[in-house]
Image: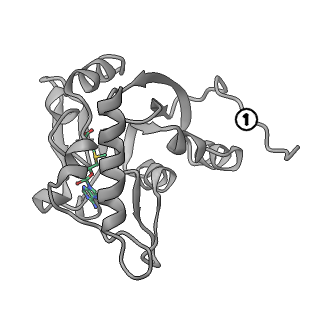
Amino acid sequence: MFELEINILYSYIMEEKKRNEFGQIPDDHTKNDTYYLHQTPNDLARDLINLLPLKPGDTILEPFKGEGAFYDNFPADCHKDWCEITEGRDYKTHQGTADWVISNPPFRMEDSKGKRVNCFFQLLEYYSTRANKGIAFLGNDYCFSTLTPIRMKKLNELGWYLQGYTICNVKKWRGRYFFMVFTKEQTDIIKYLLGSY
Ligand SMILES: C[S@@+](CC[C@H](N)C(=O)[O-])C[C@H]1O[C@@H](n2cnc3c(N)ncnc32)[C@H](O)[C@@H]1O
């Protein structure tokens, strides 16, 4: 427990040290301590993939491969592809579609004004037109909270439905993590209210 807190504090200090004069952390696309801290444990990725309805022959894209926790565990009878900025493949340059897009994506990315913002919903929207069957993203409670009622409605209008999520703990990370699975199968299993109370 103590070791976990030290790790989190160390990672926080290292992140803070990177802030520029505008208080922003420039994107550092190198394999530093922060990069390794954010890699998904291999056995968690394996267990999460086993919960997905993947079919032989499906094409799967891991757009943020990192060290390959998800990518390496994709079924052998599927066709797989990847991007990873530290290896020179930016997800934005990937061409074409995939049946499934599966990842623990980056938590924050620079927006059009260069500000680092939570990018979870932005990435969901991005892949809503590039995935044919499903999108499965692992994210923390901040990511989960970006799914506001208005955004859930927007996803539904784009033809995507949250089918459910798997809750998990990761010792080296803070709080709870949610593996959220979106497909085009219409469902209202996850409900939302658009009013403000
Ligand atoms: C939270 S880590 C997770 C890595 C991996 N998906 C996993 O589950 O272990 C996010 C990864 O996204 C990569 N990344 C960040 N920006 C990227 C971009 N524009 N294109 C591709 N990869 C990017 C980072 O280098 C990092 O490896």
Left/right placement of residue 121 relative to residue 25 reads: right
Q: Name the residue: 18% across, 47% down.
A: 82
Mark 1 is on which residue type?
Tyr
> Is 48 located above or below residue 160 in the figure?
above
Q: Is residue 99 visible?
A: no
Q: Is residue 129 visible?
A: yes
**What is the residue that sits farthest to the right in this orientation?**
197
Q: Nearer the viewer, residue 175 or 16?
A: 16
Q: Nearer the viewer, residue 173 or 187?
A: 173
Quadrant of res 85: bottom left
Element under disc 1: loop
> Is 7 located above or below residue 13 in the figure?
above
Q: Name the residue: 43% across, 56% down.
A: 126
Left/right placement of residue 182 relative to residue 8 reads: right
Residue 92 x %, y %: 29, 63
Confirm if mark 1 falls within 8 A of ligand 1: no
Disc 1: which residue = 192
User: Which quadrant does the C terminus fall into?
Assistant: top right
Q: Nearer the viewer, residue 50 or 174?
A: 174
**What is the residue that sits farthest to the front in this orientation?**
2
The colour scheme used to paint the residues is one colour
Q: How many marks do you count on the picture?
A: 1
User: Which quadrant does the N terminus fall into?
Assistant: top left
Residue 66 x %, y %: 19, 46
Disc 1 residue crowd, few under 14, some 14–19, many 20+, Cα 10 Å: few
> Is 22 located above or below residue 178 in the figure?
below
Left/right placement of residue 31 relative to residue 91 reads: left
Residue 136 x %, y %: 39, 34
**What is the residue that sits farthest to the bottom in this orientation?**
21
